[in-house]
């Protein structure tokens, strides 16, 4: 009888340890769900409307969650300035949110991708013909988002620009419509989405003169090469299956946007 009791106790301990091990990633995958960071305010890319989430990045995030059997996506807003922190503190499993791959960011997180190549451009009011490109921004009030590569790029290109940094792109768009700023800068994909929104139609336009190359990647825990490789394989399948093109056409096509040179890109090796 003693042996039986010991066996039962041993089994109970083993089960408890097993459950604890499974629950180790509770902050990112609990109850059959996986927390994924996306943008909440980028039409055509990552947009939250009530309980609905739409956009090219959202479609990829859902595909990755299903392809990698991670569970049902639970979306978390990944504001530009907070993305690295969200990953480093395990508040999300990964981020798909117009996350440009840069050397500075690779010091803090790892990337799978790129899965899309965009270019930085300018959004201005439809009746403003004074801004024809980045070279005409000197002395102008330019809006960008805190923590984005867009702000840094413009400051390098035009030291005389009056840069206004807001928390979200939506606030920048509102400021542009209210004539509190003269232009908004970020990736052409994002700008096209805003210009095509029903509330903005005819009020603003994309200049159409890109001045950077932005490689979007899936941000994940630094050094997790095994997971990075799984995401990379899934991205390659996403492209080869035709799902990538479907997502681009569905989400960015209505804005008259066409993917530029280099698309779809070949993901870089994980390291």
Image: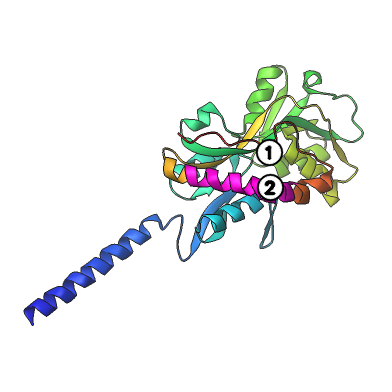
Q: Which residue lies furthest to the left in this view?
A: 2
Q: Inspect this view and state whether residue 78 appears.
A: no
Quadrant location of the N terminus? bottom left
Q: Quadrant of residue 116?
A: top right
Q: In this view, does 193 lie above or below 260?
A: below
Q: How is the image coloured?
A: rainbow
**Residue at 66% from the left image edge and 50% from the top image edge:** 241
Q: Quadrant of residue 204?
A: top right
Question: Is 135 placed left or right of 91 in the picture?
Answer: right
Asked which secondary structure carries label 2, the reply is helix
Q: Quadrant of residue 167?
A: top right
Q: Name the residue under label 1.
A: 264
Q: Inspect this view and state whether residue 104 appears.
A: yes
Magenta region, residue range: 229-248
* Percent position of residue 110, x then y: 48, 37
Q: Main secondary structure of the magenta part?
A: helix
Residue 199 vs residue 221, the one in the foreground: 221
Q: Residues within 10 Å of mark 1 (few under 14, many from 20)?
A: some
Give the distance between the C-alpha atoms of the residues marked 2 and 1, in whole angstroms.
Answer: 8 Å
* Percent position of residue 5, x then y: 13, 78
**Residue at 75% from the left image edge and 35% from the top image edge:** 188
Question: Is 212 placed left or right of 66 in the picture?
Answer: right
Residue 207 vs residue 12, the one in the foreground: 12
Q: Mark 2 points at which residue?
A: 244
Asked if marks 2 and 1 touch (Cβ < 8 Å), the reply is yes
């Amino acid at each position: 009888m003693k042996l039986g009791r010991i066996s039962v106790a041993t089994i109970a301990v083993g089960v408890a340890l097993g459950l604890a091990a499974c629950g180790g990633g509770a902050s990112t995958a609990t109850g059959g769900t996986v927390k994924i960071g996306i943008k909440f305010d980028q039409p055509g890319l990552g947009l939250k409307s009530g309980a609905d989430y739409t956009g090219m990045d959202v479609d990829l995030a859902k595909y990755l969650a299903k392809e990698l059997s991670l569970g049902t996506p639970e979306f978390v807003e990944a504001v530009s300035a907070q993305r690295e922190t969200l990953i480093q503190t395990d508040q999300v499993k990964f981020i798909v949110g117009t996350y440009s791959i840069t050397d500075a960011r690779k010091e803090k997180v790892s990337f799978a991708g790129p899965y899309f190549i965009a270019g930085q451009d300018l959004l201005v009011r439809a009746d403003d013909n004074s801004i024809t490109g980045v070279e005409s921004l000197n002395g102008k009030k330019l809006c960008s988002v805190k923590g984005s590569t867009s702000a840094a790029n413009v400051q390098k290109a035009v030291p005389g620009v009056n840069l206004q940094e807001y928390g979200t792109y939506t606030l920048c768009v509102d400021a542009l419509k209210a004539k509190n700023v003269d232009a908004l800068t970020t990736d052409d994909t994002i700008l096209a989405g805003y210009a095509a929104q029903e509330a903005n139609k005819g009020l603003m336009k994309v200049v159409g003169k890109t001045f950077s190359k932005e490689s979007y990647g899936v941000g994940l825990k630094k050094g997790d090469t095994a997971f990075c490789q799984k995401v990379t394989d899934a991205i390659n399948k996403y492209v080869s299956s035709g799902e990538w093109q479907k997502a681009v056409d569905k989400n960015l096509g209505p804005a008259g946007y066409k993917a530029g040179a280099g698309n779809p890109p070949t993901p870089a090796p994980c390291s």
